[in-house]
Amino acid sequence: MRRLSSLFTKEIAIDLGTANTIILLNDQLVVDEPSIIALDKNTKQVKAVGKKAQMMHGKTHEEIQTIRPLKDGVIANFQATELMLKEFIKAMPGLKGHLFPPALKMVICIPSGITEVEKRAVRDSAEQAGAKEVRLIHEPMAAAIGIGRDVLSEDGNMIVDIGGGTSEVAVIALGGIVTCRSSKTAGDEFNDNIIDYMRRKHNLSIGEPTAERIKIKVGSAIEDLEDPPEDYEVQGRDLVQGLPVSVKVNYREIAQALDHSISEIESAIKSTLESTPPEMCVDIYKNGIYIAGGGALLRGLDKRISQMTHLPVHIADNPLMAVARGTGIALKNIDKFPFLMK
């Protein structure tokens, strides 16, 4: 009976992120694409989604527009989100070749600071994309599960999830979030910092995709790395002459550019610790802090946070996948995890 049911119902776990959308079907990664869509301005038809749309970003002519439909971790453009999800789901290999489209059961992760209106927007987008049943899970909870922490135990676990639109800092125990802080200082803010730095220090105008590449190649949270990356050559437009030029940047420059934003994340961590019950502080002192999300890949971030808190800091294995992995585990254990929201 269960096998027959699985023919007509497919369970999908979605990490609907500001920067990337990750979808798991039966524990298998089927979508890992940038959260961006390209539309024809006149007909509103979809030209591309994901990586193909990302390649068009900043290069389109007047008849095509690229849209990042999520901002600060929540849906900013409902219609574009719905279209993007539909295209991602349509392209999933596990759903092709069915005579009758299967019913979709989804668990989607959301920021902890989300409002009821924003929750409704997530549900509506999923339902319009074909979901028959939608459950929601908070990102820090999904990250903790994906990292392998026992979120149902009485031990306190501190999770820092640095995504594209938000940074979530939470202390979790007994299947609930005891205290948390949500900050809009995250990956997108880092990119803006880099764009602003290149403009001020090098008179160079660059776009978001170039800033993202700089962050990946030479991004750092500290100015003294044991194993520093090589300098990175950046191409852009000279603000004085208006001509294409190339300059080299190093990780120390990017650490300076990101310093203020990282300090804001540190403030959120400190504020969360200050509001944590004393007995849970004992658990955190023993277990340390766990970091997930794309921001966890920033060189030296764990060292900087450890120096600030005097606590051990652990980077999740494959931090980009931690939230999606936790969402998938929650999907398989809906009865076990009562905190999933209908």
Image (spheres, grey):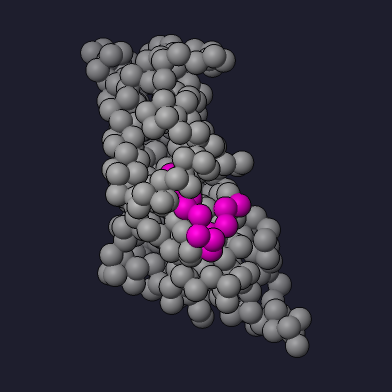
Q: Is residue 294 left or right of residue 267?
A: right
Q: Is residue 152 left or right of residue 209?
A: right
- Residue 342 x, y percent position in the rendering: 43, 77
Q: Is residue 221 above or below residue 292?
A: above
Q: Is residue 147 above or below residue 263?
A: below
Badge count: 0
- Residue 332 x, y percent position in the rendering: 63, 69
Q: Is residue 328 above or below residue 211?
A: below
Image quadrant where one finds the N terminus = bottom right
Using the rendered view, name the quadrant where residue 274 is placed: top left
- Residue 233 x, y percent position in the rendering: 47, 15
Magenta segment boundaries in residue numbering: 148-160
Q: Nearer the viewer, residue 21 or 92?
A: 21
Q: Is residue 46 left or right of residue 271?
A: right
Q: Nearer the viewer, residue 98 or 3?
A: 3
* Residue lying at 50% horizontally and 15% vertically, measured from the top left: 225
Q: Is residue 149 magenta?
A: yes
Say whether residue 122 is visible: yes
- Residue 70 x, y percent position in the rendering: 36, 54
* Residue lying at 32% horizontally and 39% vertically, measured from the top left: 270
